Amino acid sequence: MTVPIRAFLLKFARDRRRWLPQWLFEAKKRHGLSVLNYMVTSNHIHLLVRDNGEGDVIPNSIQLIAGRTAQEFNQRKNRKGAYWEDRYHATAVETDRHLVQCLVYLDMNMVRAGVVEHPSEWSFSGYNEIQAPRQRYALIDYEGLKELLNFGAMDELADAYRGWVDEALSKGQHFRDGKWTETVAVGSERFVTTTKEKLGVKGKGRQVLGGDGSYELRESPAPYKAILRHENDSLRPHNAYSWDDIS
């Protein structure tokens, strides 16, 4: 999922640190949020999370994190007005090769922005935590990530993940791809079609696009702002179904 921030209100490392070890960790502890990866930039946030089957975990966690972050920042800066530019946008990702691609895509964010040359150089993402798992205050659900990627040990997963990232860098596969931030679902044709069916009437007008084993569920062509708002409405806690995986 992607959460846009008004202007560049997370430009200071101090505020990014409050968002990560303070409120993201609190959401994990309080609501049981399963975090697979994360990326905090100066003006937006990406979270790759796993749905544990309890419909309120993700929206309650986002409400906690977004609300407390905005409140703290506004109080410290003595400012008023909206902190977040819009509600979060969620994309369902199938737990196959698409999950690997999404993990890597998130960690490439600041490489795409030209801020760093390698994800390891940006402290506010999950790359370094995957490479060196924490004994305390871990944000990433290591057991969940190992299970989804079929690894028995975290060091094996870390080695493989480092290889995936390095391969993407060597092949120049770090450019922006809207399917991870602007679609409703990404995965196989069956996964995306099933997701559309689960949306019911909210799935009408959405198009299944793709080929070669990779498909997307997209809105009919329209201004992005309108797409973002409509998809957010469909993915709020009022849903009558649960995602298998949400990013």
Image: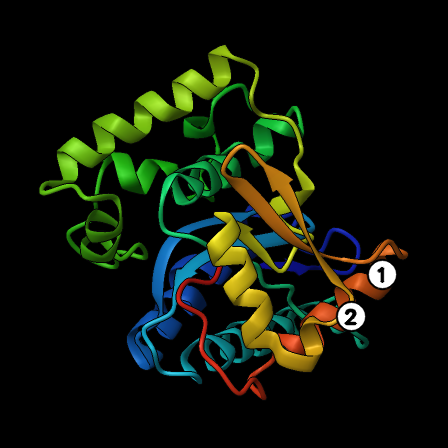
- Amino acid on which the number 2 mark rests in the picture: Arg
Q: What separation in Å lies between label 2 and label 1 (alpha carbons)?
A: 6 Å
Q: Is residue 207 left or right of residue 67?
A: right
- The chosen color scheme is rainbow
Q: Is residue 92 visible?
A: no
Judge whether 169 appears above or below 93 on screen.
Answer: above
Give percent across and percent down for residue 87.
69, 71
Measured as percent of width and height from the top left, residue 152 is found at 9, 43
Mark 1, Cα crowd under 10 Å, few <14 / some 14-19 / many 20+, is few
Residue under pointer 1: 225
Task: Give the camera-side residue of 162 and 5.
Answer: 162
Q: Which mark is residue 229?
A: 2
Q: Are marks 2 and 1 in contact (CB under 8 Å)?
A: yes
Q: Residue 139 at x, y = what percent? A: 32, 57
- Label 2: how many Cα within 10 Å (few below 14, some 14–19, many 20+): some
Circle number at residue 169: none
Asked if residue 208 can be seen in this view, the reply is yes
| Figure quadrant of residue 166 | top left
**Residue that lies at the very extreme toward the right in this rendered image:** 223
Amino acid type for the residue under numbered disc 1? Lys
Query: What element does badge 1 sit on?
Result: helix
Out of 163 and 227, give the one closest to the viewer.
227
At numbered mark 2, what does the secondary structure look like: helix, strand or loop? helix
* Residue farthest along the top direction in this orientation: 170
Pinpoint residue 38: horizontal percent, then vertical percent. 45, 50
Q: Quadrant of residue 57?
A: bottom left
Q: Specify the quadrant that holds the N terminus.
A: bottom right
Q: Is residue 17 left or right of residue 206?
A: left
- Side of 37 relative to 108 (left or right): left
Residue 99 versus residue 231 in the image, above or below:
above
